[in-house]
Image: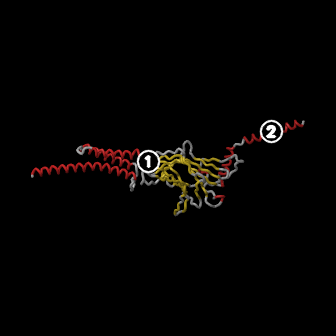
Amino acid sequence: MGSGHYFWAILYFASLCSASLANNAKINFREKEKKVLDQILGAGKYDARIRPSGINGTDGPAVVRVNIFVRSISKIDDVTMEYSVQLTFREQWTDERLKFDDIQGRLKYLTLTEANRVWMPDLFFSNEKEGHFHNIIMPNVYIRIFPNGSVLYSIRISLTLACPMNLKLYPLDRQICSLRMASYGWTTNDLVFLWKEGDPVQVVKNLHLPRFTLEKFLTDYCNSKTNTGEYSCLKVDLLFKREFSYYLIQIYIPCCMLVIVSWVSFWLDQGAVPARVSLGVTTLLTMATQTSGINASLPPVSYTKAIDVWTGVCLTFVFGALLEFALVNYASRSVTTYKCLRILYIQQL
């Protein structure tokens, strides 16, 4: 009998455990998420117009940490002095009004796709010319709310940014293109942007640019003061090195060949006037066309570029070869005329 009682007790305990596990398995966490969202974002409970408090609930400025992932850089335009970049932009801050119960660690975070439901930093790109969001198939944006009130905002955007360039060493130059992000309306008394600790900027590994190489990038701060206050600002400096091989093949080698061809006239007979004139004029016009084609792909700057010095020297050599023929021809005709006059003078004597 004793063993029978033990058997029924164990069976009863097992049935209770099974029922408990079944009840836990039946918990609908999606329904829990809805209830939590209604609890923290319901009408009259959360006002997205009010900024979060400072660190540890103080009255100081709200701290927003930023990090970006550069997905691609499509072009760097010398004429318009701009570049296009696609990136994943992320911001993270703490809003204590959004704290919730994580159900013993089972509810890791809540996900939103509507940015207007919570307070958002008023960040803008100060050197932006054009930009757009990505909405295929759905808007590429999300907001994650963690149990401790931490908010993560992530969005994929494409931007065309201004990049003032110094082309004095073109095409042996290096250019620094910046990405500047600043607060538009909140001053540093209310909002401060900081770079995320540990690798705040990431670049895709297989980044390919046809005429440039991304050597390195640096993060820094660029707070600005105006007559309305001081505004927090972040910047990324991208250092690009121009690839020289393209210009070696397209510009330097053809210019050298034109100069060498113009020197062929030195080995022609001085009496071969049509051949020497045709060769000199043709190489001079070709060199002038090459120079104008190079300048057409560059902005009209007020200073002399390295490529201008190179094409100017090549053009001088080609023109000098043509001028040499003219001087030699003139000198030879002068000598011939002098000899003829001398012979006539001797005959008259």
Q: Can you give x and y, in whole percent of width and height, for residue 43 in the image?
A: 65, 52
- Looking at the picture, does residue 165 appear above or below residue 31? below
Mark 1, residues whose alpha carbon is within 10 Å: few (<14), some, or many (≥20)? some
Residue type, numbered disc 1: Phe
- For marks 2 and 1, the one nearer the N-term is 2
Q: Position of residue 247 (x, y in %)?
A: 41, 46
Counting from the top left corner in percent of width and height, residue 318 is at 31, 48
Q: Return the mark for residue 187.
A: none
**Rendered image: mark on residue 14:** 2
137 relative position to 286: left or right: right
- Closest to the observer, 301 or 251: 251
**Residue 29: quadrant of the picture:** top right
163 to the left or right of 190: left
Q: Is label 2 in a helix, a strand or a loop?
A: helix
- Give the side of residue 144 with respect to residue 158, left or right: right
Callout 2 crowding tier (Cα within 10 Å): few <14, some 14–19, many ≥20:
few
The numbered disc on residue 244 is 1
Q: Residue 281 at what x, y percent from top left?
A: 28, 46
Question: Residue flagged by tag 2: what amino acid is it?
Answer: Ala
Is 247 or 329 nearer to us in this picture? 329
Q: Residue furthest left?
A: 349
- Looking at the image, do the residues carrying marks 2 and 1 touch, with CB atoms under 8 Å apart? no
